[in-house]
Amino acid sequence: MSPMNGNDLPSRIGRLPDLVAARAITPGVLQGYEKLSFSSFKGKIEDPIDDTVRWDAEPIRELLAEAQRRFADGPSTASDAWLAPRLHYILRLTRSEASESGLWNFLALCVAPEFVYWRWGAGSGGPGVRQTARFSGRWDLQCFSRLWWAAELFRDGDNYGPVVVACGNQDVLNTVLRQEMIQHRPAAQGLLRLQKGDVVRTGRDMNAAASAANAAAATLVYEAMAPDELQDSEALRDWILAAGDAAPVQYETLPRGPVDGSVPHRSAEILAEWFEELFKHAQVRGKTKIA
């Protein structure tokens, strides 16, 4: 049974306050037998930030429906890797806007609760969603914000290729995503180079490499070692405002993100080399360290 009546859907993306969301997520909702109703939230929803087409809800619903069709055998890192760049492309936000939890609450509880059930467990006859945070919670746990932020932090300018690599490793989403070092773009790209170069092969390897790199950042200033370049804020703004004129999201090929500046290649290489050296001395959980 669908968690929401098909005729009771919003046409625009607003914001649902945390307190309202918390009250709506009852044990019955988590277990999947209590139906959500968009109409029950009316009068409690904050309007979209502006009146542009980027807040239209239908493109998001279509994208999520396609993800469920495409990965009909069940969600996985592959579905996350496919969805993250396309969600970012459609949902064009500033980082300030993306930091508002009300937006993500609205997507999960008003626009696409059925997707949250599909991704996090309920499904047909299956167990309910175990974590309230998948509907409304910390940015790196919430069903949609985790994917949008993964795309934002791991994209290389307009190139979403690194996002696919990052989201293809569940430990990147579960652990690495919230580490402070990822805020430095060359560090994020340098870490992914370890995976692409087969230096790290498992999720535990990635966790160990990222933990070592993050700890080293307490004594080493990555910006001095491997400087980044300022992103073009005007180009980002133009990309956001061009949402209504943008080409439809492609399902078979990656879209192109904002042309706001690529990560300096040499800086990413410097940090990749440094991270590889740190990883040689890192303790990987479950592996015996050879003296």
Image (cartoon, helix red, strand yellow):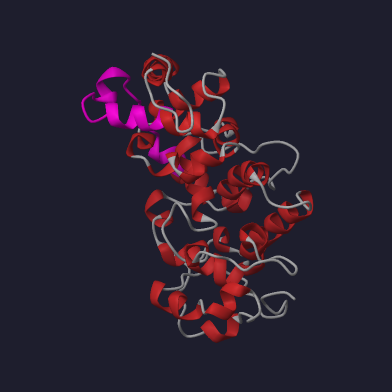
Residue 262 visible in image: no
Decide if residue 7 is on the left or right side of residue 196: right
Which of the two residues, 284 or 220, is positioned nearer the viewer here? 284
Question: Quadrant of the image for the N terminus?
Answer: bottom right
Q: What residue is at 62 percent from the left and 71 percent from the top?
A: 11
Q: Is residue 46 above or below residue 43?
A: above
Q: Quadrant of residue 84?
A: top right
Please report the residue visible at 40 percent of the width from the left and 72 percent of the height from the top.
18
| Residue ID at (66%, 43%) | 82
Membership of 278 in magenta stretch: no
Q: Quadrant of residue 8?
A: bottom right
State the image coordinates of residue 178 (x, y, percent, origin top left): 39, 44
Task: Look at the picture and state if 197 lies above or below 178.
Answer: above
Q: Where does the magenta region start and end?
A: 209-236
x and y percentages locating residue 5 in the rendered image: 70, 80
Residue nearer the viewer, 218 or 17? 218
Q: Position of residue 246 (x, y in %)?
A: 63, 46
Q: Is residue 269 visible?
A: yes
Instruction: Name the image quarter holding residue 144.
Output: bottom right
Left or right? Give the position of 172 relative to 120: left
Above or below: residue 93 compared with residue 43: above
Residue at 28%, 26% in the rendered image: 216
Quadrant of image for the C terminus: top left
